[in-house]
Image (tube, rainbow, N blue to C red):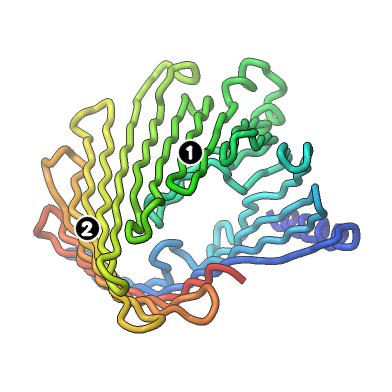
Amino acid sequence: MKRAIIASLLLFILAGGAFAQLTFSGEAFVGFQLEKEYDNDEVITATHRDKTLPKFNFVATAARENYGVKLDVDFEASHTDPFSLNGIFGWVDFLDGDLHVSVGQISDAKWVTNLDSDVETFFDDVTGFRVEYKTPLEGLNVGAAFRADGILIEGFDLEYFFKTIVLGGSYVTPLFNTVIAYDMGHNAQLLFGFNYTGMDDLTDAGIEFIGRELATFDSEIKDWELTFKEKVGYRVMRPLNVSLLMEQIFYEDADKLSLFFTPAASYRIMPGLTASLSATLYTTNAFDTANLAIKPCLEYTLKGPALIYVEYELGLEEMKRDNHRFGFGIDIKAF
């Protein structure tokens, strides 16, 4: 992996002279947590609330008007895999930019749902190539992604090739946006998202559907999974926002039914400083047991796209065994 990273960096150093514009960007996440689980000792870790181990994402892009290349790599504080190559790919635009073709290890997803800010769902981060087309209908984009990694390893197989295609599209208007993607690989997956954006005070309003293991052409065993998410957020007054996030996960085994119900509120105390409180009631076994997680948090936004957070979480397993987590950290969303 180190050789791959070095080779990729050398490629961009050499490419810099051939391209009109060479840009660098990235994100960084670091944190500290103190955890005390029921009937266990306290544990101190260098853990971020969302990204686990300290992580730095580095992105380099070399581009001209209608073509370019991109490198996307993570550096993580891990002894086993400190470097992770998310993507290295190139693209070319045709038809005055209406047709966009990407080739390589693609890490920029186009057909994405992100109803929950902590969970981004997409299928088109492929090693192969992707074609996107801006249709004559304003806001409507369609495309397909083609995986090549399995073919490169096992040799070309036309049936395998067609069974691993990802089809996708998005439609964006001033009132709403929607996305749909169908991944024929992984025994068939379906992704659908709809977000309403037509009211200023309605900060979030949308639904999300994910279906997995929906076919049997990759496997004789079908263990399907259907996930539904709904979210609504409303600005009660300028400093105060309230929201409700719900999630239902259905399985072929009905006893594994999972339900999540999360009301939350945030209040801007002063410019840059926001307090929030959320409470998640959930079950992962069709209400044989229920759990509760209560999380107060303080966030202070720094100059630029960065913030410092301090948060505490009280978890009640089966509404009786208490777990405690205290953490603080820094998010730098863009360099």
* Residue 227 x, y percent position in the rendering: 33, 37
Determine the residue positioned at 47% across, 24% down.
Answer: 187
| Amino acid of disc 2 | Pro
Which quadrant: the C terminus?
A: bottom right
Sequence-earlier tag: 1 or 2: 1
Residue 240 lies, with reference to residue 176, above or below; the image says below
Give the spatial CA distance, label 1 vs label 2: 25 Å
117 left or right of 17 in image: left
Q: How many marks?
A: 2
Determine the residue positioned at 50% across, 75% down.
Answer: 306
Residue 166 in sight in this render = yes
109 left or right of 290 in image: right
* Residue 166 x, y percent position in the rendering: 57, 30
Task: Tell me, yes or no, whether the two marked residues, 1 and 2, touch with CB atoms within 8 Å.
Answer: no
| Amino acid of disc 1 | Val
* Residue 68 x, y percent position in the rendering: 79, 51
Q: Which mark is residue 290?
A: none
Secondary element at tag 1? strand
- Mark 1 nearby-residue class (10 Å; few <14, some 14–19, many ≥20): many
Secondary element at tag 2? strand
- Mark 2 nearby-residue class (10 Å; few <14, some 14–19, many ≥20): some
* Residue 153 x, y percent position in the rendering: 69, 30
Q: Which mark is residue 263?
A: 2
Give the labeled residue for mark 1.
179
